[in-house]
Amino acid sequence: MRACIRATGSCLARKSQARSAVILIFMRLSPTLDKLVDALKRLPGIGPRSAQRIAFHLLQHERDTAVKLGEALLAAAAEIRHCARCNTLTELDICETCASPRRDAGLLCVVESPADQLVIEQSLAYQGMYFVLLGRISPLDGIGPREIQLERLLARATDGLVRELIVATSFTPEGDATAHYIGELLRARDPQLKITRLARGVPAGAELEYTDVNTIAQAMLDRRAA
Ligand SMILES: [Zn+2]
């Protein structure tokens, strides 16, 4: 049995060495390829193997796509910036949402990212303004109130136009901590300002018996008149 385990161990070690050798050979193929794989590896959810697969796929089968992708990335990096009022991604100094006279300037929704803002827009349930934090408070990652520009949010929320601040940060420990921090700061600065948080509850289309107990508990606490 021991010999078998030892044999399996040495077999695994040989396989791992062989894999390293393959990667080494691949890396020596071309410094340009190496650079491409390194760049792809930085994308969220893409590990070294996926990065290699994407690089090979683009160069073997999708040359046109590779060129279009490169051009689109260059154009986006050159043209897209952050809105001077809400921080979202835009090609203008002030984004279309902030510049729109049809939006309710009395409602300000705080989100963590442009992607979160987009989801709320797609819901068609909100017609107010936004402030995009571009992050959330996470002391373990060294992200504090200064990194997410809370002073700018406080100035915006207390400019006399905003009636209600809707905190739509994620329902994660960091998102909850950020929401709590924003609430505390704003209540101290402007006790009259209405501060709300997105309700959390059972997702649309979900069966109760398959919903996790924390969600059920929160839905029970946040229940409203039917
Ligand atoms: Zn904007």
Image (cartoon, helix red, strand yellow):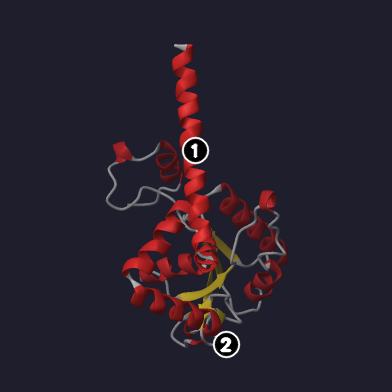
Q: Is residue 122 visible?
A: yes
Residue at (58, 65) in percent of width and height: 194
Which element is circle 2 on?
loop
Residue on which the image places disc 2: 93
Image quadrant of ligand 1? bottom right
Q: Nearer the viewer, residue 77 or 215?
A: 77
Q: Nearer the viewer, residue 193 or 209?
A: 209
Q: Nearer the viewer, residue 20 or 35?
A: 20
Give, as a three-letter code, the residue at label 1: Ser
Residue at (47, 41) in percent of width and height: 18
* Residue at mark 1 to residue at mark 2: CA–CA distance: 52 Å
Residue on which the image places disc 1: 16
Give, as a three-letter code, the residue at label 2: Asp
Q: What quarter of the picture does the N terminus occupy?
A: top left
Place of residue 205 in the rendered image (x, y in percent of width and height, measured from the top left): 27, 51
Q: Nearer the viewer, mark 1 or mark 2?
A: 1
Q: Give the answer, above or below, for where 61 lies relative to 11.
A: below
Which element is circle 1 on?
helix
Place of residue 34 in the rendered image (x, y in percent of width and height, measured from the top left): 53, 63
* Total residue callouts: 2
Residue at (57, 62) in percent of width and height: 195
Of callouts 1 and 2, which one flags the residue occurring earlier in the amino acid sequence? 1
